[in-house]
Image: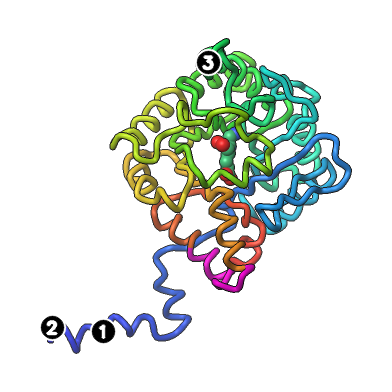
């Protein structure tokens, strides 16, 4: 028998729900949640995403409603992903002032005003016909420096359309610096950047590529996204570089398989750290729950609590509105 027992009895604090609630060390708040939304050009009805039950590609009308519902539930922010009607080699839709993201921004801002932060993902993969996150060299490699100009132009175009935070997700070297410089020159020095600083090449993005219609048409993203078995220290290096380039907040993505990395980053930096609970994490829970194999609500809360406990200040999750409604105020 331990020297401490029977005086020490950890179960005392677990005995009732009020006790457990009072001593909880990890709390979720609606304001910490960010809802990713997809909006598609030229559709008249929301289009369900097969591999993400409950998630749709929105019309310009339905995205307003989704933004309204998120704001009403107290969700902290929303991040827009656009799917253009026409794609090309340079992702022309990304910086088109009349592009789908720019138009959705106008509508969403008119709907929610200042009730939540309206952010934009800045990348090219939704806008290129080859599905890569940048423009290509003649021999089919992603051309880092040429892509930076496209990101800068897209970010300025999004800021002009009202984006309140720019989130570059393409994993090009120097993307934060290029965007910061362009935003500042265009008069948007006050628009913050949240870097997708630590982004692994991940099988967990599978359903997103259906939702955003951006699967690479050849090869994969391993030459620009991080290897899940990559060098120790690589995540921290990416974060340090983004901060030196002017990032105001950083992100780790995916979430659940990289909680160790999330904790490491949280302990190392003094800016807000976000974690992205990605499409595959969502799909796994929904699929198992649909089969009756797990308790859906319980597992959703358990995963979000784990992500928070690992150090996320902000969490991007497709369940943001639903969970915000369920959280105690
Ligand atoms: C790239 C981007 C991706 C995701 C967010 N931004 C896909 C990718 O890198 O292949 C994935 C998000 C998710 O899976 O939920 N623009």
Callout 2 secondary element? loop
Residue at horizontal 33 percent and vertical 85 percent from the top: 12
Report crowding for label 3: few under 14, some 14 to 19, many 20 or more residues within 10 A (C-alpha): some
Foreground mark, 3 or 2, reads: 3
Q: Is residue 153 left or right of residue 246?
A: right
> Quarter-wise, where is residue 307 in the image?
bottom left
* Label 3 or label 2, whichever comes before in sequence order: 2
- In depth, the one of 167 and 246 nearer the eye is 167
Q: Is residue 16 left or right of residue 1?
A: right
Give the residue furthest to the top.
Answer: 138
User: Residue 278's x, y, as percent?
Assistant: 55, 48
Q: Looking at the picture, does residue 150 appear above or below residue 198? A: above
Residue at horizontal 45 percent and vertical 21 percent from the top: 173
Residue topped by disc 2: 2
User: Residue 295's x, y, as percent?
Assistant: 56, 73
The main secondary structure of the magenta stretch is helix
Residue topped by disc 1: 9
User: Residue 154's x, y, as percent?
Assistant: 66, 22
Foreground mark, 1 or 2, reads: 2
The span from disc 3 to disc 2 (Cα, nearest Å) is 63 Å
Q: Is residue 269 left or right of residue 173?
A: left
Disc 1 + disc 2, Cβ < 8 Å: no
Task: Magenta stretch: give its range.
Answer: 290-302
Residue at horizontal 43 percent and vertical 59 percent from the top: 306
């Amino acid at each position: 028998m331990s020297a401490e027992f029977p005086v020490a009895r950890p179960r005392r604090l677990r005995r009732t729900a009020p006790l457990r609630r009072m001593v909880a060390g990890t709390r979720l708040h609606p304001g910490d949640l960010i809802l990713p939304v997809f909006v598609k050009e030229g559709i008249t009805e929301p289009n369900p995403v097969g591999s993400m039950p409950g998630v749709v590609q929105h019309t310009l009308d339905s995205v307003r409603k989704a933004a309204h519902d998120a704001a009403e539930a107290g969700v902290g922010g929303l991040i827009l992903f656009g799917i253009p009607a026409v794609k090309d080699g340079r992702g022309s839709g990304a910086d088109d002032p009349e592009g789908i993201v720019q138009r959705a921004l106008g509508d969403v801002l008119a709907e929610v005003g200042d009730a939540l932060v309206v952010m934009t993902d800045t990348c090219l993969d939704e806008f290129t016909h080859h599905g890569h996150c940048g423009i290509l060299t003649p021999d089919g490699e992603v051309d880092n420096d040429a892509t930076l100009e496209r990101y800068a132009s897209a970010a300025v175009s999004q800021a002009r359309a009202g984006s309140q935070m720019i989130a570059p997700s393409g994993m090009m070297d120097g993307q934060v610096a290029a965007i910061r410089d362009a935003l500042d020159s265009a008069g948007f020095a006050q628009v913050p950047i949240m870097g997708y600083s630590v982004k692994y090449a991940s099988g967990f993005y599978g359903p997103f590529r259906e939702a955003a219609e951006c699967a690479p048409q050849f090869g994969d993203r391993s030459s620009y996204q991080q290897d899940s078995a990559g060098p120790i220290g690589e995540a921290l290096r990416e974060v340090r570089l983004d901060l030196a380039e002017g990032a105001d907040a950083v992100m780790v993505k995916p979430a659940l398989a990289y909680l160790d990395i999330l904790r490491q980053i949280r302990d190392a930096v003094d800016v807000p750290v976000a974690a992205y609970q990605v499409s595959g994490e969502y799909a796994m829970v929904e699929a198992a729950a649909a089969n009756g194999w797990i308790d859906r609500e319980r597992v959703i809360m358990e995963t979000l609590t784990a992500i928070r406990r690992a150090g996320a200040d902000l969490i991007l999750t497709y369940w943001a509105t639903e969970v915000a409604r369920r959280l105690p105020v």
